[in-house]
Image (cartoon, rainbow, N blue to C red):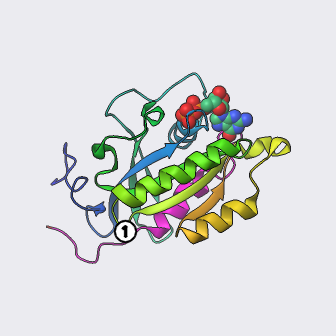
């Protein structure tokens, strides 16, 4: 098994493994408190557990999904572990990322501005063919909404991003987020040996 115990392919290419089984590095970006960790924990563990933070440091959680065409996609999800408080993230964070999920909180215009900042950072430092998703989280708090769907859609379209609103709390659109990302991944045309 050529990939056993290694991260082969994560550092040099966007998608690794063979044509039916993709392995991708996904980085999470967004203001502190928008719900990045909760989105991941909802996706990976099926739970909403605000007290359980993703491990600090260079580790990540992974989750595999199967698409209708029987392709499997293994997401290796990198959380900022609080480093989003600093102006810049280490280049290591972006390196080899095939997917970036930029999240904001629909009840915070400041978090939407911050999302735009991270998109600019990605455009500077990320891979040119990175798949980018704009995620408006905390959709369950729609009564306190300050960021309109229209503004988010317009921004996403301008920047070649896929847009979705989610709720880590109710699980709304969490699986859909990752399925839509998986569909947008470039498929390797050659089976590696
Ligand atoms: P991070 O700093 O971006 O990783 O944010 P966290 O995942 O730690 O979440 C920050 C806070 O937002 C926690 O108190 C969560 O309970 C809350 N939260 C996260 N997602 C949601 C959501 O979809 N809806 C609501 N109502 N609260 C959420």
Q: Quadrant of residue 129?
A: bottom left
Q: Is residue 182 above or below residue 28?
A: below
Is residue 169 visible to the viewer in this orientation of the structure? no
At x 31%, y 41%, the residue is: 90
Magenta stretch containing residue 183, yes or no? yes
- Mark 1: which secondary structure? loop
Between 140 and 152, the residue placed more toward the observer is 152
At x 53%, y 24%, the residue is: 52
Image spot of residue 157 (x, y percent)? 60, 70
Is residue 58 visible to the viewer in this orientation of the structure? yes
At x 31%, y 34%, the residue is: 58
Between 187 and 141, the residue placed more toward the observer is 141
Residue projecting furthest to the front = 87
Please state if 91 lies on the left or on the right of 76 as rendered: left
Read off the residue under disc 1: 129
Image spot of residue 59 (x, y percent)? 33, 34
Q: How many marks?
A: 1
Please state if 7 lies on the left or on the right of 137 as rendered: left
Image spot of residue 32 (x, y percent)? 55, 34
Residue projecting furthest to the right = 143
Magenta stretch containing residue 151, yes or no? no
- Dividing the image into four equal quarters, which quarter contains ligand 1? top right
Image spot of residue 27 (x, y percent)? 42, 48
Between 121 and 28, the residue placed more toward the observer is 121
Please state if 8 lies on the left or on the right of 78 as rendered: left
Which range is magenta?
Answer: 167-192
Q: Residues within 10 Å of mark 1 (few under 14, many from 20)?
A: few
Q: Quadrant of residue 70?
A: bottom left
């Amino acid at each position: 098994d050529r990939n056993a115990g290694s991260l082969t392919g994560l550092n040099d290419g966007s998608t690794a493994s063979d044509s039916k089984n993709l392995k991708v590095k996904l980085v999470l970006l967004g203001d502190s408190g928008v719900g990045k960790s909760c989105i991941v924990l909802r996706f990976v563990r099926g739970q909403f557990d605000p007290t359980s933070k993703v491990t600090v440091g260079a580790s990540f959680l992974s989750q595999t999904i199967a698409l209708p065409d029987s392709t499997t996609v293994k997401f290796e999800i990198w959380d900022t572990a609080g480093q989003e408080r600093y102006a810049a993230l280490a280049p290591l964070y972006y390196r080899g990322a095939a997917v970036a999920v930029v999240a904001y909180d629909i009840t915070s215009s400041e978090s939407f501005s911050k999302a735009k900042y991270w998109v600019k950072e990605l455009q500077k430092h990320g891979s040119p063919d990175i798949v980018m998703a704009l995620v408006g989280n905390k959709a369950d708090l729609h009564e306190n909404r300050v960021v309109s769907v229209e503004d988010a859609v317009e921004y996403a379209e301008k920047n070649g991003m896929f847009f979705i609103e989610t709720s880590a709390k109710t699980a709304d659109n969490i699986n859909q987020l990752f399925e839509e990302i998986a569909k947008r991944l470039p498929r390797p045309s050659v089976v590696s040996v």
